[in-house]
Image (cartoon, rainbow, N blue to C red):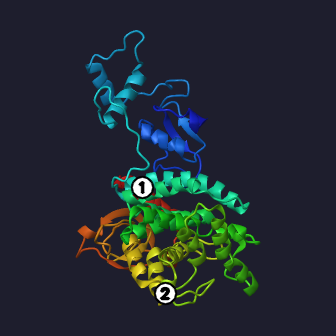
């Protein structure tokens, strides 16, 4: 029997049948599972999921054990052979079967040991597949904080550093655990970017770039803070940001460009945001050749963070859906950025490409086998041979069962021919397919 309960009422031993809301709102790849891990329970409660459907025939109910759950024959025989008929007042057969199943999938711990939940600030290295779940939890927590912060900013109330530092600490830890997982997740997402989601993505890119450039941890975090807040001035414009398109009149364009000075002046108001962080509001649309705004600065006259933010902002804007245009494939975006001769700092762009990979996670590539594949992981130091999942046969023009290929191990047999645009093949609802392939890859590779 299925029953909806609030997420606050979820407990270990329940069988989760369905999680409310879209996949980006929670840090789980499976939506049907027996809940046995305290960390998964903690992540669920920390997510934006408000309720779940539980199956009380397969797991516990809110008030205790659920209905009868027939054990597998082998488990039943094992229990009988062990002389496990329940004594009076003991656990029911169904309960003991559940405990046996849990024992089989849960590593044994010494008696008296405590289960240590995952530390969100841990910097211990993880694979993309394992880190993505934690990255989704970071997104959920950050969205709650940033929604309130940006609304506060829109109303003219100063932002304190203490409000946003927890977001930066979470992002920094996620990028330290895996420099590609968070940014890959942001490339895969289907939702149009809100103002603060763009800031969140740019912040993570700035952190990854700062690490690649060898900045110390304090400067890396300041770079992340700069990316997070660089567009705060958009909330002070006298027009609806959601209606902004490429068809702006000259007068409207001039108004939009004032978000740079508005943001800088706003961050200075509270006195808690460092000057070089606030300065990025003013400089992230400047270009090294003097073609940017608002002050047409050139070269090193633009601060280091300003030049870094220009690169990260352009990349995230190109690879995110906008009301007036669809996203561009990550690898194609890097090619277009290379073609912006003189506009972006070449050295910083080189570091940026090293930080995201030649074929960033979320890129679509065509293989020598005639198949399209999605980049799902990087091989550190060998960025031209990432891990991919093939999902489409170009010759027969049909979707195929995803195939896992580590191209580092396939040299001479399977290679990337070029990056490709899935839209050219008329694949129906490709964003949903891309999400499904990435979802499956992360689940399989955990």
Seen from the viewer's position, the closer of residues 8 and 61 is 8
Snapshot quadrant of residue 156: bottom right
| Disc 1, SS | helix
Q: CA distance from mark 1 to mark 2?
A: 32 Å
Mark 1 neighbour density, 10 Å: few (under 14) some (14–19) many (20 or more): many
The residue shown at (58%, 74%) is 326
Q: Is residue 409 above or below residue 93?
A: below
Q: Position of residue 280 (x, y in %)?
A: 56, 73
| Disc 2, SS | helix
Mark 2 neighbour density, 10 Å: few (under 14) some (14–19) many (20 or more): some
Seen from the viewer's position, the closer of residues 185 and 236 is 236
Q: Is residue 415 above or below residue 118?
A: below
Which circle marks residue 173 in the picture?
1
Which circle marks residue 274 in the picture?
none
Instruction: Report if the CB atoms under discs 1 and 2 are less than 8 Å apart.
Output: no
In this orientation, does residue 184 appear? no
Which residue is situated farthest in the top direction here? 88
Q: Quadrant of the N terminus?
A: top right
Which circle marks residue 299 in the picture?
2
The residue shown at (55%, 24%) is 63
Classify residue 80 as left or right of residue 266: left
Q: Position of residue 28 (x, y in %)?
A: 47, 49
Q: Position of residue 188 (x, y in %)?
A: 49, 64
Q: Earlier in the sequence, mark 1 or mark 2?
A: 1
Residue depth check, mark 1 versus mark 2: number of the one nearer the observer:
2
The residue shown at (41%, 38%) is 37
């Amino acid at each position: 029997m299925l029953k909806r309960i609030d997420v606050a009422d979820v407990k270990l031993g329940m069988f989760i049948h369905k999680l409310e809301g879209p996949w980006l709102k929670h840090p789980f790849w499976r939506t049907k599972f027996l809940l046995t891990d305290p960390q998964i329970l903690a992540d669920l409660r920390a997510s934006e999921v408000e309720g779940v459907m539980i199956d009380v025939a397969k797991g516990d109910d809110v008030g205790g054990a659920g209905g009868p759950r027939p054990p597998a024959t082998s488990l039943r025989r094992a229990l009988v052979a062990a002389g496990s008929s329940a004594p009076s007042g003991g656990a029911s057969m169904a309960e003991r079967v559940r405990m046996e199943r849990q024992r089989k999938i849960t590593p044994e711990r010494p008696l008296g040991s405590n289960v240590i939940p995952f530390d969100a600030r841990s910097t211990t290295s993880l694979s993309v597949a394992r880190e993505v779940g934690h990255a989704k939890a970071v997104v959920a927590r950050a969205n709650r904080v940033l929604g309130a912060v940006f609304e506060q900013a829109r109303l003219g109330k100063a932002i304190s550093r203490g409000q946003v530092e927890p977001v930066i600490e979470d992002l920094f830890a996620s990028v330290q655990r895996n420099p590609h997982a968070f940014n890959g997740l942001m490339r895969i997402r289907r939702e149009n970017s809100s103002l603060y989601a763009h800031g969140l993505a740019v912040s993570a890119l700035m952190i990854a770039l700062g690490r690649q450039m060898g900045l110390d941890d304090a400067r890396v975090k300041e770079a992340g803070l700069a990316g997070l807040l660089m567009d705060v001035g958009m909330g002070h414009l006298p027009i609806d940001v959601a209606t902004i398109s490429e068809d702006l009149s000259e007068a409207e364009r001039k108004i939009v460009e004032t978000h740079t000075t508005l943001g800088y002046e706003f961050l200075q108001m509270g006195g808690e945001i460092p000057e070089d962080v606030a300065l990025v509001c003013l400089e992230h649309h400047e270009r090294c050749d003097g073609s940017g705004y608002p002050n047409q600065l050139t070269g090193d006259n633009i601060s280091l963070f300003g030049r870094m933010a220009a690169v990260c902002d352009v990349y995230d804007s190109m690879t995110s859906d906008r009301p007036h245009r669809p996203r561009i494939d990550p690898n194609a975006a890097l090619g277009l950025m290379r073609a912006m001769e003189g506009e972006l700092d070449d050295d910083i762009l080189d570091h940026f490409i090293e930080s995201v990979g030649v074929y960033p996670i979320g890129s679509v590539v065509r293989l020598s086998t005639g198949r399209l594949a999605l980049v799902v992981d990087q091989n550190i130091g060998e960025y031209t041979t990432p891990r991919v999942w093939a999902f489409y046969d170009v010759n027969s023009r049909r979707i195929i069962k995803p195939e896992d290929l580590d191209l580092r191990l396939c040299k001479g047999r399977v290679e990337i021919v070029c990056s490709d645009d899935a839209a050219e093949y008329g694949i129906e609802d490709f964003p949903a397919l891309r999400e499904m392939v990435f979802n499956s890859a992360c689940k399989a590779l955990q």
